[in-house]
Amino acid sequence: MLQSNRAVGIVGYGAYIPRYRLPAREIVRVWEGGVGGVPVQEKSVPGLDEDSITISIEAARNAMRRAKIDPTDLRAVWVGSESHPYAVKPSSTIVAEAVGASPYIQGGDWEFACKAGTEAMQAGLGFVGSGMADYVLAIGADTAQGRPGDALEYTAAAGGAAFVIGPAEESVAVVEASLSYVTDTPDFWRRQGASYPSHGQRFTGEPAYFGHILGAAEKLLEEMGRTTADYQFAVFHQPNVKFPQRVAAMLGFQKEQYEVGLLSGVIGNTYSGASLVGLSAVLDVAQPGDRIFVASFGSGAGSDAFSLQVTERLPERQGLAPSTQAYIRRRKEIDYALYSRYRGKLLLA
């Protein structure tokens, strides 16, 4: 179990989800002739002028509004993503400049498949907890891609969330403890230069997703002496709708605990932002004293689990930036042809 010497927490938070939506029925229409079920209702799709950096900037600005600190007080900006726009050029420097935090700042890009965002967040807890800094901006954002017709295409979506990590006495939610669980389980991968990721079919479930989230979650609960009944909310990585519901049941969480943060049915899997966007949605409605359990998952494979408790500062910060649900409601439906254009699936030269 990881705990810093200095009590730390989330000072500000924010999310961003692109407005375009591709209904899952459109993918079925194109690839299955309209026959068959769908794993989600629809997914978010970035516009031609959106990528992981622009998503990070929007989420970061929302987090900074709620944190109510000067951007120059930040000492690190870390962006976790598996879809950084540049192979060689950091995303973090662009985000830091856009929010007004540069130049006297540490910048870095993080990558651990779908848990790159919580990886950056966990590092931020250590950075602030050690006393090296008072504030760190940790972000998880992605514009995920799935091979046309592949199962991943139904859920590979876009979105992100940002969190300002700072001293507990200024936080809207204190991070009580965290714990990570990783193994070399190659369930999902994309080699350098490959346009689309590959996955191990059913192998991605039991030994990967479930094995690692259960490993991290059960150990953290055990070491803290807690049970699932001690939490009002729970958030899990959501590659689809079924996986987080199943792992929640396996751990003993009830529907009313996880349903607020379960967003994959309407925006798809935002990869590095998935569990963090869910956490943002929970913080939009949580009340002082509530406890929140979060467990991310990243293929390759690993899980970061967190236990948080909401403070009396949260209610006054909730309305300072658009809510996660506001971004979900702000939608424009597109068809598969426009989606193919926006996501570069049609090569015109």
Image (cartoon, rainbow, N blue to C red):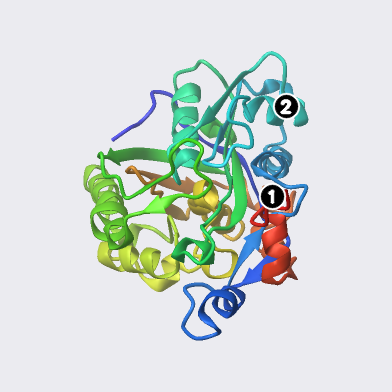
| Residue at the (72%, 23%) spot, across then down | 101
Residue 324 location in percent, x, y?
65, 58
Is residue 159 in view from this perspective? yes
User: In the image, is 176 to the left or to the right of 347?
Assistant: left
Is 61 drawn above or below residue 101 in the view shown?
Answer: below
Q: Quadrant of residue 71?
A: top right
Q: State which quarter of the image contains the N terminus.
A: top left
Residue 57 location in percent, x, y?
71, 39
| Residue at the (39%, 23%) spot, across then down | 5
Q: Which numbered circle lies on residue 239?
A: none
Q: Which numbered circle lies on residue 71?
A: 2
User: In the image, is 3 to the left or to the right of 277?
Assistant: left
Is residue 18 in view from this perspective? no
Q: Do the residues bearing badges 2 and 1 touch, measured as CB atoms within 8 Å? A: no
Residue 332 location in percent, x, y?
76, 69
Please name whichever residue, 185 or 302, is drawn nearer the observer in this view of the structure. 185
Q: Considering the numbered disc 1 on the image, is that residue within a helix, a strand or a loop?
A: helix
Q: Considering the numbered disc 2 on the image, is that residue within a helix, a strand or a loop?
A: helix
Is 137 drawn above or below residue 46 in the view shown?
Answer: above
Look at label 1 and name its amino acid: Glu
Could you classify mark 2 by the number of other residues whose Cα lies within 10 Å: few (under 14), some (14-19), or many (20 or more)? some
Q: How many marks?
A: 2
Q: Quadrant of residue 256?
A: bottom left
The residue at which mark 1 appears reads as 316
User: In the image, is 206 to the left or to the right of 85?
Assistant: left
User: In the image, is 102 to the left or to the right of 188?
Assistant: right
